Image: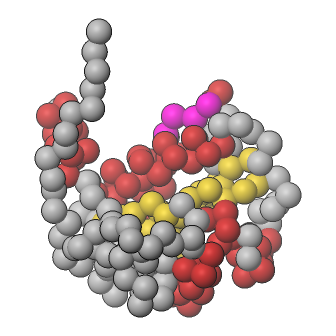
Amino acid sequence: MNPDELLELIKTRRSYRTFEDKQINDQQLDMILEAGLYAPNAGGRQSILFLVTQDKQINEQLGKISRQVAHVVKGRYVSKEQPSIIDNPDIKSALYGAPTVITLLGPKDFIFSEADCCVACQNMMLMAHALGLGSCMISRAALTMNSDFGKALLEKKEIDTKKYRAFYHIIVGYQKGKTAIKERKSRIYKY
């Protein structure tokens, strides 16, 4: 890939919150996770954990919990083409029916865990876009996974909730509809 192609990939990636009822395949998932694993991380610690859920019932329950814990600011607007729970109070799942949910967790005692998760999210969303998939980063993972249901999921996979905290969910699937690509205004200041 040349630099122009990479820049075009970055410029055309958008957040999607509506998905087809079709699961992504294992090869796509592996590539997305590998992109996350190779994200820059503070001190080379490689301490981020990825919890993948592709079970429809689990994702629906997590989405309902995420909706309940959301602090929705009325009067704000996110997207006409891909409405969020802020735009439409009738949306029952804050994970939007995505077939794949990846929860990123980091050590509670490491100051850069959230930043490491954030960079991994970007890598994974760019890879999803390169694979023709839609994705969106959801920031309520800590509150969602701190529920009894979330804690039980983590404990079942032997993730120590005293040592690790969830930071973000990435939702992934075959997107429905399109999101407008708007020209960005320059916010760059140079000396």
Q: Does residue 120 appear left or right of residue 128 in this picture? A: right
Q: Is residue 103 above or below residue 37?
A: below
- Residue 131: give x, y in percent of width and height: 27, 59
Q: Quadrant of the C terminus?
A: top left
Tell me what residue is drawn at x 32 percent, y 75 percent.
Answer: 83
Q: Does residue 185 appear left or right of residue 169 in this picture? A: left
Tell me what residue is drawn at x 34 percent, y 87 percent.
Answer: 21
- Residue 147: give x, y in percent of width and height: 73, 76
Asked if residue 39 is among those painted magenta in the image, a careful observer would answer yes
Which quadrant of the figure has residue 134? bottom left
Q: Is residue 42 above or below residue 25?
A: above
Residue range (magenta): 38-42
Residue lying farthest to the front in this orientation: 75
Q: Residue 158 versus residue 144: which sits nearer the camera?
A: 144
Q: Tell me the colour scheme of the image.
A: secondary structure
Q: Residue 36 versus residue 65: which sits nearer the camera?
A: 65
- Magenta residues: mostly which secondary structure? loop
- Residue 126: give x, y in percent of width and height: 33, 50
Q: Does residue 113 appear left or right of residue 9 in this picture? A: right
Q: Quadrant of the N terminus?
A: top left
- Residue 154: give x, y in percent of width and height: 74, 70
Tell me what residue is drawn at x 24 percent, y 63 percent.
Answer: 132
Which quadrant of the figure has residue 28? bottom left
Q: Is residue 62 visible?
A: no
